Image: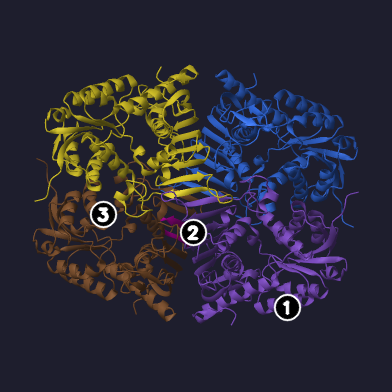
Chain colours: A brown, B yellow, C blue, D purple
Amino acid sequence: MLPSKTKIKVGLIGTGFMGKAHAFGFTNASRVFDLPVEAELDTVADINEAEAGRAARAFGFAKATADWRDIIADPEIGIVSITAPNALHKEMALAAIAAGKHVYCEKPLAPLAQDAREMAEAAEAAGVKTQVGFNYLCNPMLKLARAMIEAGELGEIHGYRGLHAEDYMADATGPFTFRHDPAGGGALADLGSHALATAEFLLGSVTDVMGDCVTVIDARTDASGTTRKIEVDDIGRAFLRFENGASGSIEANWVATGRKMQHDFEVFGSKGALAFSQERFNELHFYSTDDAAGRQGFRKIEAAPAHPPYGLFCVAPGHQIGFNDLKAIEVAGYLNAINGDGAEPFNFRAGLRIQTVLEDIQQSSLERAWRKVGE
Amino acid sequence: MLPSKTKIKVGLIGTGFMGKAHAFGFTNASRVFDLPVEAELDTVADINEAEAGRAARAFGFAKATADWRDIIADPEIGIVSITAPNALHKEMALAAIAAGKHVYCEKPLAPLAQDAREMAEAAEAAGVKTQVGFNYLCNPMLKLARAMIEAGELGEIHGYRGLHAEDYMADATGPFTFRHDPAGGGALADLGSHALATAEFLLGSVTDVMGDCVTVIDARTDASGTTRKIEVDDIGRAFLRFENGASGSIEANWVATGRKMQHDFEVFGSKGALAFSQERFNELHFYSTDDAAGRQGFRKIEAAPAHPPYGLFCVAPGHQIGFNDLKAIEVAGYLNAINGDGAEPFNFRAGLRIQTVLEDIQQSSLERAWRKVGE
Amino acid sequence: MLPSKTKIKVGLIGTGFMGKAHAFGFTNASRVFDLPVEAELDTVADINEAEAGRAARAFGFAKATADWRDIIADPEIGIVSITAPNALHKEMALAAIAAGKHVYCEKPLAPLAQDAREMAEAAEAAGVKTQVGFNYLCNPMLKLARAMIEAGELGEIHGYRGLHAEDYMADATGPFTFRHDPAGGGALADLGSHALATAEFLLGSVTDVMGDCVTVIDARTDASGTTRKIEVDDIGRAFLRFENGASGSIEANWVATGRKMQHDFEVFGSKGALAFSQERFNELHFYSTDDAAGRQGFRKIEAAPAHPPYGLFCVAPGHQIGFNDLKAIEVAGYLNAINGDGAEPFNFRAGLRIQTVLEDIQQSSLERAWRKVGE
Amino acid sequence: MLPSKTKIKVGLIGTGFMGKAHAFGFTNASRVFDLPVEAELDTVADINEAEAGRAARAFGFAKATADWRDIIADPEIGIVSITAPNALHKEMALAAIAAGKHVYCEKPLAPLAQDAREMAEAAEAAGVKTQVGFNYLCNPMLKLARAMIEAGELGEIHGYRGLHAEDYMADATGPFTFRHDPAGGGALADLGSHALATAEFLLGSVTDVMGDCVTVIDARTDASGTTRKIEVDDIGRAFLRFENGASGSIEANWVATGRKMQHDFEVFGSKGALAFSQERFNELHFYSTDDAAGRQGFRKIEAAPAHPPYGLFCVAPGHQIGFNDLKAIEVAGYLNAINGDGAEPFNFRAGLRIQTVLEDIQQSSLERAWRKVGE
């Protein structure tokens, strides 16, 4: 009776938190945005068959499988969502790309930049659309911040300070996990990737870095009860130079007791400044030297329909969107790109870029010397 | 292949913002919660057939209709969601109840308490489950607040201050709308209902009120270009007495320039206090006299998996849920109640209760005298 | 060698915290402001002679006495500062006025308005200058707020919400003190006086009130071990009507657990709004509808040299003045008035005014009915 | 009649803002604290005789002179306060020390560490007491922070982030001033000195630094109309290693548009964390993992009598001290030290220490390499 949208079937690998977030994302993107294409939740894969079944039921997929290769092999599936452990991303993505599927992969693309490069190049050669999960960038307030900077509302940019601090590794008795794996682990990789992505999203390319990576808790016990020396950073800091001439710094910190989501930045320009915290991500604080003397101050701009696509979620200001809504925005942008409308919000090439800068910071820290990015 | 959930078909009347929010709510409740019953979006009704079609497509309904009575007449539909203009709620709800359907109605139930009473009594007589949209109460931080009060973490309650202020009517050149209708309109009805619901959610029944309803902008122009005198309140204040012996106050204000979602409260007890603002609704501020001397202060508790059902939306603290997630929590509670598991989060009887207190405040303001509630 | 200032000798009655604050105030006013007249700390009186001596030495007075009448009798003393218990204010002030001295009296002028009236009239008849300690009004940010309102930066005023909440009486085991004395005691008298003074300072005269005074803790033990029934309010609320047509409310609360200085206000107008908290009294938050769409928000104006007399204390913004600096501003204004330059910041007539409004609120609460002020 | 205190005469060199602040400091220290010694404002010197006279009258000095050497030559003067331009500090201080006087010098002690060293050594050899103006450290909340760290309330310290950002040099059209002088100028010297002093005050000695000093505005016009190349840093960053094993960072920034007093820090430990901003310096935010699960959060501790010497300024919490009160605390500590009671709050040796670390950061930035401090 009603005109139908183009459908595209989705296969999801992984049923953990990010798997659930992807499922939400596809469902909500279709409900919130009026997209020309609609994602259909088709198959979910988990090595544990019962878990796959539970997830299918809970997330709304039609089918479940214990073998992710079933998804690759299914000619009807158009998008493969990868939320499996990082170490498996490359094999899965390359298989999906080889099968001509669009690939949506959680961050990090792969533990090492060389792997991420292979993945990006394969996708580009195959002409498929890719997406890496950097959903903080999908926040309407971050888009507003970028638009304000680009429009010159801050004047010439003088400096930047970025941060992503949480405390999930602050407990020294916590176990050794895959995040501590020397290949690709550490706070800089886990959280600094967000801090860097935000920095480049706002100010453009970083050209030079000086890193300072520190291990705070020297050893942890793994699942087998073995004490493992920790080789990755608990705190990763960097001085930055941007192509636009500005300088700045970032810090990634997963032992920041008390902090749950301190993904913050301040950017200072000749005419204004912005301050933001992901702890209150529906707000952007703006200072303008254009305000009258004696009336200047940082003003708290609250997310509102004036800041698209906020209005698709809430018709009135101040109602606030949530973390999962950021995922829906990300998916909507990706589906539009698949449909030929605009670029992917953050494709494999962009993921590779962040990985590259990260490794330059790590290398710089090891060498205790500044480094050009990508050389 | 997979075991199926019990399905229950939903008919939605109204396609505006709240219609969309209901659709999200049903979809997300099923994705986020592992419910024994799954809502199926079946039919959406709008007086404008093309709009109904558009909404069906956008929100994910199988069918569209221009006649809401089609939904009532459809024996397969189990839940009727009413998001049509307030003046129509009663007729629609009574028809749905008569047809044995569960009814989910946006607030206010009806312009006047006498109508709300009829609706509540009809539903109770019919044995159907009802729900009124008071989703702010579904916030995990409000549940935490109530649990803390009930557990005695604040000691004996000494005082309460509630508020719901926004600025959507602050512009005197804005038009006369249905919200200005003397029957059921005004800031107290529109926003004060939330302030009251929160107050009773936290402290229990209000027994006495003294109202102060003020019209700030005397006249507005309606759609036909006619100047209309405004008879409803732009600001509605009340002193309150609670059954538990505490006293308090609320203010509802829709001309509070600059405020977008100042649905706030402070509650003070003999041992502690809580402060909350809907502007930052993933936070609850708690003061405890149990803290060591010289170390006391309001502490900012951020929403976390320790505050269910937050963890079903985000596995880590600080990520934050959004307005639409509150709706999903509301729907999940309602679906559970329909399935026989627990009471409805806020049924017609509860909606009637708020309407009753509201009218007592309005009446008290007219009489310029204190009033017992419900006498 | 250097040209001297006119000197005026000060006699201080009372050596407690406010006595110390007066001494500071006189000293600092002279250091910070370039006043034509300099206050000389001459004699301090305390019923306990040793304490008077200690205070003289500590505060910098030349002489000490156990008899406050020595100060009245000393023809060289020009200003009498009264910081003795409230019940003694009237006798002391009338004696000083009769002796032709200027009188600076801590708030409240007297327990009852009728006494305050006698004092104000005596001073006016004698032509001496008077001052009551309402130093919160001397805050540069409050002066800024008033100037902005007067200049129309908020447009027409729509509403007001004032508050003064602290927790120094929240402990039910705390003793019965003079503040609980039925004659002049209670939270409304103690804290509500500030809330009212601020409200009238900003918006002009209150014309009608509806009070709600509540005793939360029914009995306390006095110094002799006797249990005393508490008859004064622990929480005093009022609805207000202002001469300018605006409506508003205040709350005074001394059982507000966790609050130390919640002397706050919000004022909403047709074009803008202000929000202020004495907890952070070097800030004023301002919202303007003149800001560009999508860029509006409450902005935090920090105290700066643009807000006189802040610049006399700190040459740069953001350094912040303290509570005692407010006292210095008050004294400077008073000394200028004594020297014939401008009106006193808050004279006995102004003190009487606040006392009158207070008593109307208390009476209104007793009568459970609205009351015209001063009738 | 009353027992007198020991008097010590003060000579002040310089009549600008810091001169005024010193004068306040001496006066207020005596009024607020019950010190065994009282400072007497004796002589003030300024190269402009009329200005010296005006200052004497305004600040309360007995005499004025155009020649600072009159102060040195006066055998009755015990303390020399130096608030003249930085370049003159050394000559004046050495002369005062040679005359056996105690010396209180504004920061920085001298443009270069080698000069500061000479001054510190001369003072130590002469046995006089010295003080450098680092009054932010005198804040009761900073003393609380240090006490909490020392008492182990944060557990083992994991990381530190310090900052001092203001915007007084953000305007590129602002003039070339003495603060831009290559000898001793720059944001790191001016503001970074505070950030470093706070870092070492809280965590102890810094052992290694990696600096990043950046000039943002390349040229400015001096008073003669000449364009001058800027060689000093507008932003100075550093990575830090502390002797206690912790790592951290600081940033000094005088082009941080919108920031007036962003002298902030966060310190993270294994059991807790502290966050502080000088913008609201009567607050300290504390997170403790000892708080119950689901009840944890940063709590805002407001300055109170429990945090000495706050109670000497205000008898009740929440009233707040101001910038000039910090100076009074500094002076009181210094006067006590002169009287043989305790060490000076921040003597020349401490000033030299900060100068040394600063120069190591500047040198490290030039060399683009890590540096041991003081080698």
Which is more toward the observer, D332 or D225? D332
Other-residue count near label 2 (Cα within 10 Å), few / some / many at <14 / 14–19 / ≥20:
many
Residue D35 pos. (x, y %) = 78, 56
The answer to the question of whether label 1 and label 3 lie on touching residues, with beta carbons closer than 8 A, is no
Q: Mark 1 lies on which chain?
A: D
- Residue drawn at 51 percent across, 45 percent down: B288
Q: Does the magenta stretch include residue D215?
A: no
Q: Earlier in the sequence, mark 1 or mark 2?
A: 1
* Residue A21, numbered label: 3
Other-residue count near label 1 (Cα within 10 Å), few / some / many at <14 / 14–19 / ≥20:
some
Specify the amino acid type for callout 3. Ala
Other-residue count near label 3 (Cα within 10 Å), few / some / many at <14 / 14–19 / ≥20:
many
Establish if A343 lies above or below A294: below
Which is more toward the observer, A347 or A36? A347
Q: Mark 2 lies on which chain?
A: D
Q: Which of marks 2 and 3 is in front?
A: 2
Q: Nearer the viewer, mark 1 or mark 2?
A: 2
- For label 1, the SS is helix
Q: What residue would you read off at disc 2?
A: D272
Same subunit under labels 1 and 2? yes
Q: Mark 3 lies on which chain?
A: A
Would residue B361 be found to the left or right of residue C74 on screen?
left
Q: What residue would you read off at disc 1?
A: D121
